[in-house]
């Protein structure tokens, strides 16, 4: 067999649909990530933000990650941040439309590396508001999927396999952190509380919570079966790998409809397509797919008889070899008794460790911020105090939970973490001071401003325990939540 024939074995012609879904899907997530940053970053971290970037860079020095904001005499400006977001959104939108895919093989690499570099620059200075596992997940995906190439070359087998390694780290890592981290996952009681105590419930979360206990046991067993067992089947030949990937996708869709986890679940679904072949999709659909345009996607790229050029294979060999070197520590972490969750082992957030809910909470606490216009806040009665309502987290007990994911409400997520350990965190103190001064920035991120821009005369912070209203309570008064007042913990 000639060397050109050997190289053709590195082409994965049966994954053209997977390539289209992954590249366009990841690009769409980048658009959402840059959009949420465009709206939220200046308020949270900008020139007048709660945790200003300039102060962070002065304090962190070289400990801050790679960022373009170091390359200017003025290291950060809201204008520059918004220009970067607009550039990222334009690149992402072009990829969703399939424009870079029409160029030479390297075109997608340039586009995705540009989005990765822009978002890495933002993430490196994002501090607590960007400290989520799905941020690193987006960065890793953004780096990898550009190397799936344009339509000028066949999907590369090496990158398809490396994406499956990423999926294995995602699912098996999450399963192991659950088994190691909390006894409720081992005794099958974790889902008795999860739907109610998760950071941001969705419209169906209350229904899921009120399901019978036997259903909650099945939820835990199903999670373990997929994350600890089924996931390994993606390493087997087709159609077994495709069936396993479909089971992963089904479990992720269940999480999508019962909670708000930003783009975590959608990225997992996209990466799972690396194990689904064109042949399996055609079989599952029962033949041709008229009107869907999938035949055109499956036909994109060179035919099976055409091999990709030598330079392309050499480039991929070098890239994958480097990624395999970076994989050693994440591999050890998977089987370590001291497994790390959502950890990055390098400054570029490549080949990360993932996982979620290694520790379960059984009670839901909420921090509620209220203001008053009473001239004497110290003597004002409860009727004079009005809450600042957030978009995603519970507040008004009659308000139904909303669906926001894959859009990321960063402030709402931090309020959930704050409620677990109430304290004078710098960003929270800064937010209270901004609300007290009547500054408009933070109020734009809230659902309601009870004072319509006027500065309150006083601010107080109250602590509550929330639980979903049962069916009788809901029918009686229309409440979505029931809550218990645990007292006032701060005044300003």
Image: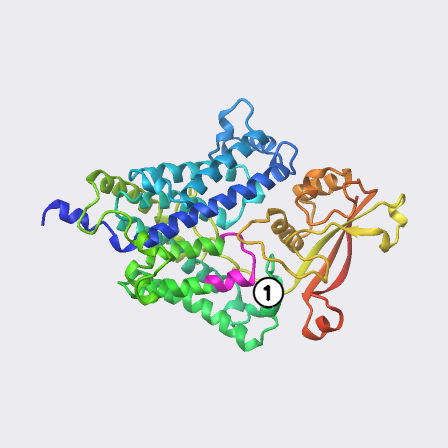
- Residue closer to the observer: 353 or 71: 71
Q: Nearer the viewer, residue 95 or 117?
A: 95
For mark 1, give the secondary structure.
helix
Residue 222 appears at what percent x and percent y? 45, 70
Residue 255: in magenta span: yes
| Whether residue 153 is situated above or below residue 215 in the rendered picture | above
The residue located at (29%, 40%) in the rendering is 105
At 38% across and 52% down in the image, what residue appears? Answer: 21
- Whole-percent x and y of residue 91? 44, 38
Kindly indicate the quadrant of the structure image that contains residue 294: bottom left
Residue at 53%, 62% (x, y): give it.
Answer: 257
> Is residue 446 shown to the viewer in this render?
yes
Residue at mark 1: 205
- Magenta range is 252-263
Query: What kind of colouring is applied to the model shown?
Result: rainbow
- Figure disc tally: 1
Q: Visible in this render: residue 352? A: no
């Amino acid at each position: 067999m000639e060397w050109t024939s050997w190289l053709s074995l590195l082409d994965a012609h049966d994954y053209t649909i997977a390539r289209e879904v992954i590249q366009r899907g990841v690009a769409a997530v980048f658009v959402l990530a840059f959009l949420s940053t465009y709206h939220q970053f200046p308020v949270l971290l900008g020139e007048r933000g709660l945790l200003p970037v300039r102060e962070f860079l002065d304090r962190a020095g070289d400990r801050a990650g790679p960022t373009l904001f170091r390359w200017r005499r003025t290291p950060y400006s809201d204008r520059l941040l918004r220009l970067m977001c607009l550039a990222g959104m334009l690149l992402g939108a072009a990829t969703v439309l399939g424009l870079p895919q029409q160029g030479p093989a390297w075109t997608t690499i340039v586009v995705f590396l540009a989005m990765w570099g822009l978002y890495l620059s933002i993430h490196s200075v994002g501090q607590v508001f960007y400290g989520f596992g799905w941020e690193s997940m987006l960065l890793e995906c953004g780096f990898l999927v550009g190397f799936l190439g344009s339509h000028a070359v066949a999907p590369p087998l090496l990158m398809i396999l490396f994406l499956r390694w990423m999926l294995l780290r995602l699912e098996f890592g999450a399963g192991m952190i659950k088994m190691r981290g909390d006894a409720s996952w081992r005794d099958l009681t974790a889902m008795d509380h999860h739907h109610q105590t998760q950071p941001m419930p969705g419209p169906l979360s209350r229904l899921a919570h009120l399901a019978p206990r036997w259903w909650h046991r099945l939820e835990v067993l199903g999670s373990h079966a997929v994350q600890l067992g089924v996931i390994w089947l993606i390493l087997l030949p087709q159609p077994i790998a495709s069936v396993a990937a479909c089971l992963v996708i089904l479990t992720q869709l269940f999480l999508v409809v019962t909670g708000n986890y930003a783009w975590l679940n959608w990225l997992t679904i996209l990466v799972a397509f690396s194990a689904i072949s064109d042949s399996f999709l055609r079989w599952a659909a029962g033949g041709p797919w008229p009107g869907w345009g999938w035949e055109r996607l499956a036909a994109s790229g060179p035919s099976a008889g055409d091999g990709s050029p030598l330079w392309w294979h050499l480039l991929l060999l070098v890239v994958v070899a480097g990624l395999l070197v970076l994989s050693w520590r994440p591999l050890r972490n998977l089987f370590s008794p001291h497994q790390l969750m959502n950890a990055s082992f390098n400054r570029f957030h490549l080949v990360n460790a993932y996982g979620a809910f290694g520790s379960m909470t059984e009670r839901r606490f909420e921090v509620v911020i209220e203001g008053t216009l009473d001239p004497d806040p110290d003597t004002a009665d409860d009727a004079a105090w009005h809450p600042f309502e957030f978009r995603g987290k519970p507040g008004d007990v009659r308000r139904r939970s909303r669906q926001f994911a894959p859009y990321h409400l960063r402030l709402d997520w931090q309020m959930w973490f704050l409620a677990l350990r109430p304290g004078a965190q710098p960003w929270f103190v800064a937010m209270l001071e901004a609300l007290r001064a009547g500054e408009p920035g933070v109020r734009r991120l809230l659902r309601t401003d009870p004072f319509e821009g006027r500065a309150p005369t006083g601010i107080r912070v109250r602590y509550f325990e929330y639980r979903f209203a049962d069916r009788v309570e809901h029918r009686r008064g229309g409440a979505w939540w029931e809550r218990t007042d645990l007292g006032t913990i701060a005044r300003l």
